Image (spheres, rainbow, N blue to C red):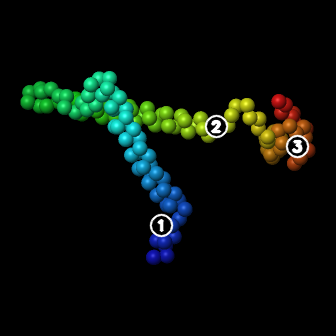
Amino acid sequence: MWKEFKEFAFKGNVIELAVAVILGIAFGAVVASFVGDILMNLIAAVIGQPDFSQLSFTVNDAEIRYGAFLNALINFLLVALALFFVIKAMNRASRKPADEEPTVRECPHCLSTIPARASRCSACTMEVQPVTA
């Protein structure tokens, strides 16, 4: 039983998942700090207060705390906006430049990889249209 547990606990997927969870928690703390410490203070500079939790009204002795809802809504929108910009920047950084030509392609007949400028497939010897710049 101990051997099975070790095999399970130290599989690559479990370790990768643990690393992903830890990185996710750390990234969440960074995004929460960015929203709470920077963006909400910018909103406070414009509106006058960063915390709306004290806003409420009373209906038949029931206190409706709409300020807490506003805080949660603004936090959600700011976190979504921050994540949008982070993911957009990551996608832009990982994208190939548009002017970079591919050096290889697939043969349309046998689907093997051939040089992009080849006029004949080296695997199936069929003629192919070369990619010209």
Q: CA distance from mark 2 to mark 1?
A: 35 Å
Distance CA(mark 3)–CA(mark 1): 47 Å
Which label's residue is closer to the chain start, 3 or 1? 1
Closest to the observer, 81 or 37: 37
Residue 11 picture location, percent across and down: 53, 65
Where residue 28 appears, as percent x and y from the top left, is 41, 45
Q: Position of residue 71 (x, y in %)?
A: 28, 33
Q: Element at badge 3?
A: loop
- Residue denoted by label 3: 121
Question: Is residue 76 at all visible to an observer of this figure?
Answer: no
Residue type, mark 2 in image = Arg
Q: CA distance from mark 2 to mark 3?
A: 29 Å
Q: Which mark is residue 9?
A: 1
**Which residue does the image show at 68% across and 34% down from the upper left?**
97
Q: Residue at x 81, y 46 (%)?
A: 112
The numbered mark, 2 or 1, whose residue comes first in the sequence reads 1
Residue 36 visible here = yes
Q: Judge by depth and name the residue closer to the eye, 109 or 32.
A: 32
Q: Quadrant of the C terminus?
A: top right
Can you identify the residue that label 2 sits on? 95
The residue located at (83%, 44%) in the rendering is 114
Q: Amino acid at mark 1?
A: Ala
Compare marks 2 and 3 and give the one earlier in the sequence. Answer: 2
